[in-house]
Amino acid sequence: MWRSSTKRTSLLAAFALTTVLAVSADAAIAAEHDVFPAGTACDFDLAVDIAGGHQVVHTFVDANGTTVRTLSTGVGSQLTFTNPSTNATIALRSNGSVTNTVFNADGSQTITLTGHNVLVLFPTDVPAGPSTTLYVGRVVFTIGVDGQTFTLQSTSGTATDICAALS
């Protein structure tokens, strides 16, 4: 079965959207191909090819050595989105992006994205997906204590609906 939270977190890191897990070294992003089943990222199956990108992740810890924040900066991945039923594609070149992740005391996370970022919202998120959107600007969202529920807080800049463009 497609593991939505694990797979989405993995893809988000590759998208240079959000590095939900702390890493302490330069991260070169490996090529990957994956498919979001219909109803998760779009109303149709959404294939994603991910290549390249380079993010430098800085980890900040408190006096006890607990990670309290990560800051990921650099160039995101080149992304190609495909609607397999129509073969329509959208290719996005690598662009700059910054991800600031704050690990809240209650176990939730607050993510602030700037630059070029793609955010995937599932039906269990707020607002409910499926949606896949390219944002150029600033996006703030939280990941609940369950590690799965994304709640969009605010956006500014431009937004492109990837699902609509591939329909």
Image (cartoon, helix red, strand yellow):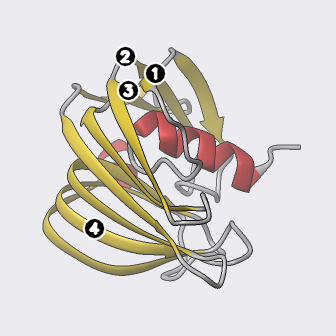
Separation of marks 4 and 3 at Cα, in angstroms: 21 Å
Real-space Cα distance between discs 4 and 2?
A: 23 Å
The mark that comes first in sequence, 4 or 1, is: 1
Give percent across and percent down for residue 3. Answer: 80, 48
Question: Measured from the top left, where is residue 69 in percent x and y?
Answer: 44, 61
Residue with the mark numbered 1: 29
Cα gap from disc 1 to disc 3, whole angstroms = 15 Å
Q: Residue at x 34, y 32 (%)?
A: 56
Q: Nearer the viewer, residue 85 or 90?
A: 90
Q: The residue under label 1 is which amino acid type? A: Ile
Residue depicted at 71% across the width and 56% down the height: 5
Q: Which residue is mark 4?
A: 139
Report the label total: 4
Q: Which mark is residue 148?
A: none
Q: Residue at x 56, y 20 (%)?
A: 32
Q: If the image is split into quadrants, where does the N terminus sit?
A: top right
Is the residue 91 above or below the residue 28 in the image?
Answer: below
Q: What residue is pinned by disc 3?
A: 80
Q: Are marks 1 and 2 in contact (CB under 8 Å)?
A: yes
Q: Are marks 4 and 1 in contact (CB under 8 Å)?
A: no
Q: Which mark is residue 52?
A: 2
Q: Does residue 45 appear anywhere in the picture?
A: no
Name the amino acid type tagged 4.
Val
How many neighbours does mark 4 have within 10 angstroms: few (below 14), some (14-19), or many (20 or more)?
A: many
Residue type at numbered disc 2: Gly
